[in-house]
Structures are given as structure tokens and as C-alpha cells.
């Protein structure tokens, strides 16, 4: 038998640069989940871990301990390969509404646990709750029922699923310890691994709207997550994708759903082409890792066929209905959209849109009423921005650049000012940035981690 653990000893050990073993980390995680370790001691350990860093072994131990801190979803009765996608977040990032039904239409089960808007990034759950009646708070039993019926379900985290993450994440948010690669990895993967996944596709954002703005930081996190998930037995790949401008042409809540359904209906508006392309690339990898295609490229082709024949749209509408959503809202989505105030912003000079500060654009969306500054605040389903020109576009003075939808007239001034500061119009067009810049498979991730000194 090992000697009993004492929290203060583990705080000191990490503070002094030591590494904790799996048993010690399990003790801390268990104490977070059941409340036996007080918040001030957990906060002290988090700060020590933030300053000293977590080793690969510590990160893997933390991920698994958090996964095992509560109930886990068992998808065995579904009889299908179970695959999910996770994005590190961005502005206008609505790929979940496309990749989940596309992958499900191709024979996979897609159990997706979404998040809410916080800071400059939007939240999948807030967007879905713009549909009247849509329920995100399903029990694990209801979750399984929707998956069995539809092939896909997008829900919120249940209180019993990974309870340690809720405690530790809230403390990290309040103690300035969020930006730790090991803790970000453990927080994301513990929830995904608790879904009982066979495979996972990670969408790691880079550029001016990314959570991690430095390319090397985003690459390290991507490699760390792939290696950690693979070590836990889940086939995983990470794609580094561009967030130097909003994804697609809409950022908000209801308007993002409208854009997604337009693509699911087989339409291809020019401003949404990057959203369609990235969704198919992500879905292609999901279909490949789930065993429904021989290569990611063949998975892409199967996904494109699911868009063309309407089967992906059918899955999406079936999921919405099964989770209580009123499909009549999509009969005339423009008529359903009722913002409190609308304003068109026009180009102030001739030239090319050469850059966008996408984080600032995200804050503009939030301050129109579509997002929140503090957890628990309400959001306006009808607030947001529709962009009429993208990076590289030639614009003329007076040409519409964006339409802003706000909760009230009084909430338009600050977002308008943010947009003008965030969008750069220059004489010359920008260099083209690839939508997907790098892909980390298990082999590439492990090689990157070996070569990176942290």
C-alpha cells in the first residue's frame, strides 16, 4: 500500500518542478470532482502546474483521470463506429451543423457534446437553442435514443459527465491559468473520450481569430491532443485550419443555422464556399477514420454525395425534431429572423480587403447581443453579422461590407466602430492563406513532440 496523499505535498512537489504520477493526479482530480479538496488548494496546484508545465505523462494521466471522474457514455448498442469532431473555436465556426449530419448519413454515429459562447467565440448550443423548442440538456439515455434514431445528436455536458472538468475549468478561468497546453488538452479530450469514441477529428484554429494566436503554440496543442488521444486508444487526427477571417458569411446564432441549412440543401453561395469546403474535409476524415471510406479523399466524396442527395439534410432535420426543435422555423428562415435593430456598414474607401482582426470581429458579434461576457448570461438568437465581402475582395467606397443585427439600436455603435478598426482596406490584395495548413496524424504528432522543447 502506498502512503496516503496530502494535497499540500502535491502542491509543493509541482511548485518545485517535480512531476506527479498517475496516482497523485488521480487523487487531485477525485478531490475536485467530489469537493473533498478545497478550491484554494486546487487553485494553488493549478497555478504551480501552469508555471512549471505538465509533462506528456502528466497530461495523459490528467486526461484519463478527468475522463473517469464521472459517468461515461457507452455507445456499444448503436452498432456503428462512433466518431466526433472538436474545434478549438472561432468566429462563424458552424461546421458541427454540417459534419455531424454528413458523417451520420454515411453510416457513423456522431455523439457531439457542444459548448456555449464565451468571450469572442460563439457557442454551438446557443446557436441550436435559437431553434424554438430545441433541447440540449438530454440525459445519457435520451442522448442514446436520439443517436439510435438519427445517427447524430448535439447536446450539452450532463452534470454527471466529467464533473472534475467543470470544477477545474471554472477555477482556471478565475485564476488566470487557462492558457496551459496540458490543461487545455485534458479538458477537451476528457469530455470527448467520455463519449466512448472510436475516432476523433480535431479542428485547431490558427490566425487572428484563434484562441492560440501563435502558430507554434497551436501546433504544439494539436500534436499534444493527437498523441494523448491515441495513447488512450482513440484514432485521432488534427487539422490546422485558418481563422484569419470569419468562417462562412455569417456570425451569430440563428443566421449561422440558416447558412448551414442552405448548404445542407445543396446550395453553394460564394460567401459560404470556405465553410462548405472545410466541413467536407473534416467529414472526410471522420468517414475515413470511422471505416466508411478507404481514404480521407474518398470520405470527402461520400460526404459531398450526402449533401447532393439530401441525406445529410434529412439527418439534421431528424435530429432537430428528435431533440424537440420546431422545424417550421426553417420554412421561411428570413421571416423568422427578427432582430431588434439592423444596420448596413459600407466600405469607406476603394481597395482590397487585405486583413481582418477576427478576434475583434468576434467581440463585435458578442456586443450586438449574440454572445456573453460571463457564464450564464442570456444571448439574443437574432443578433449577429452577415459579411458581404471577404479577405482579398476588391471593394468600392459605399459598397456594403456587412449587415449588423443587434438586440437594440443602442447596441450598434460599438460594434460598428470595432468593425471599422478590424477590417483593413489596402491598395494591394493579401497573400492567399490555405484553409488547411497542416495535418497531424499520430506519427506526425509524436515526431513533433519529440522535436519540440517545451
Image (spheres, grey):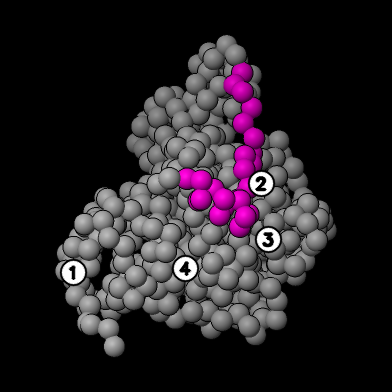
Residue at 57% x, 65% y is 230
Q: Classify the position of the N terminus by image quarter.
A: bottom left
Residue under label 4, please give it.
191
Is residue 423 at least partly visible in the picture?
yes
Residues under numbered marks 2 and 1 in contact, where contact means CB atoms less than 8 Å apart = no
Residue under label 2, please give it.
278
Disc 3 versus disc 1: distance between alpha carbons? Answer: 43 Å
Looking at marks 2 and 1 on the same chain, the residue that comes earlier in the sequence is marked by 1
Residue under label 3, please give it.
286
- Single out the mark in the foreground, 2 or 4: 4
Crowd band around label 4 with a 10 angstrom C-alpha radius: few (<14), some (14–19), many (20+): many
Looking at marks 3 and 1 on the same chain, the residue that comes earlier in the sequence is marked by 1
Q: Magenta stretch: give its range.
A: 429-452
Disc 4 versus disc 3: distance between alpha carbons? Answer: 18 Å
Disc 2 versus disc 3: distance between alpha carbons? Answer: 12 Å
Give whichever of 247, 260 is nearer the camera.
247
Residue under label 1, please give it.
9
Looking at marks 4 and 3 on the same chain, the residue that comes earlier in the sequence is marked by 4
Is residue 164 at least partly visible in the picture?
no
Give whichever of 404, 299 is nearer the camera.
299
- Where on the picture, by quarter, is residue 158? bottom left
Amino acid at each position: 500500500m502506498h502512503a496516503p496523499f496530502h494535497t499540500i505535498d502535491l502542491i509543493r512537489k509541482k511548485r518545485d518542478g517535480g512531476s506527479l504520477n498517475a496516482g497523485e493526479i488521480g487523487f487531485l482530480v477525485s478531490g475536485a470532482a467530489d469537493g473533498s479538496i478545497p478550491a484554494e488548494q486546487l487553485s494553488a496546484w493549478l497555478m504551480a502546474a501552469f508555471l512549471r508545465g505538465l509533462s506528456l505523462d502528466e497530461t495523459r494521466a490528467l486526461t484519463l483521470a478527468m475522463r473517469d471522474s464521472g459517468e461515461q457514455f457507452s455507445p456499444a448498442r448503436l452498432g456503428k463506429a462512433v466518431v466526433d469532431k472538436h474545434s478549438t473555436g472561432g468566429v462563424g465556426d458552424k461546421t458541427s451543423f454540417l459534419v455531424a449530419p454528413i458523417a451520420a448519413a454515411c453510416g457513423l454515429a456522431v455523439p457531439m457534446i457542444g459548448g456555449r459562447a464565451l468571450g469572442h467565440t460563439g457557442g454551438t448550443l446557443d446557436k441550436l437553442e435559437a431553434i424554438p423548442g430545441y433541447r440540449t440538456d438530454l440525459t445519457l439515455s435520451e442522448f442514446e435514443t436520439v443517436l439510435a434514431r438519427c445517427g447524430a445528436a448535439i447536446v450539452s455536458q450532463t452534470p454527471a459527465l466529467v464533473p472534475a472538468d467543470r470544477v477545474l475549468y471554472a477555477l482556471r478561468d478565475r485564476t488566470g491559468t487557462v492558457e496551459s497546453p496540458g490543461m487545455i488538452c485534458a479538458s477537451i479530450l476528457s469530455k470527448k473520450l467520455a463519449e466512448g469514441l472510436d475516432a476523433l477529428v480535431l479542428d485547431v484554429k490558427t490566425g487572428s481569430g484563434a484562441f492560440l494566436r501563435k502558430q507554434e503554440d497551436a501546433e504544439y496543442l494539436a500534436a499534444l491532443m493527437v498523441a494523448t488521444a491515441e495513447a488512450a486508444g482513440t484514432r485521432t487526427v488534427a487539422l490546422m485550419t485558418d481563422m484569419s477571417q470569419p468562417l462562412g458569411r455569417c456570425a451569430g446564432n440563428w443566421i449561422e443555422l440558416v447558412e448551414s441549412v442552405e448548404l445542407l440543401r445543396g446550395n453553394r453561395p460564394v460567401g459560404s464556399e470556405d465553410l462548405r469546403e472545410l466541413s467536407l474535409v473534416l467529414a472526410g476524415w471522420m468517414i475515413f477514420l470511422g471505416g466508411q471510406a478507404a481514404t480521407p479523399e474518398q470520405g470527402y466524396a461520400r460526404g459531398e454525395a450526402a449533401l447532393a442527395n439530401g441525406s445529410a439534410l434529412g439527418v439534421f432535420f431528424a435530429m432537430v425534431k428528435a431533440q424537440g426543435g420546431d422545424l417550421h422555423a426553417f420554412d421561411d428562415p428570413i421571416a423568422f429572423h427578427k432582430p431588434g435593430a439592423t444596420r448596413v456598414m459600407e466600405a469607406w474607401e476603394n481597395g482590397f480587403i487585405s486583413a481582418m482582426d477576427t478576434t475583434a470581429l468576434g467581440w463585435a458579434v458578442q456586443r450586438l447581443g449574440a454572445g456573453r461576457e460571463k457564464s450564464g448570461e442570456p444571448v439574443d438568437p437574432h443578433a449577429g453579422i452577415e459579411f458581404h465581402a471577404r479577405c482579398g475582395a476588391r471593394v468600392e467606397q459605399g459598397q456594403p461590407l456587412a449587415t449588423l443585427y443587434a438586440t437594440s439600436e443602442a447596441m450598434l455603435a460599438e460594434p460598428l466602430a470595432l468593425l471599422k478598426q478590424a477590417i483593413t482596406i489596402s491598395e494591394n490584395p493579401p497573400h492567399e492563406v490555405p484553409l488547411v495548413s497542416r495535418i497531424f496524424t499520430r506519427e506526425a504528432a509524436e515526431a513533433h513532440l519529440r522535436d519540440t522543447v517545451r
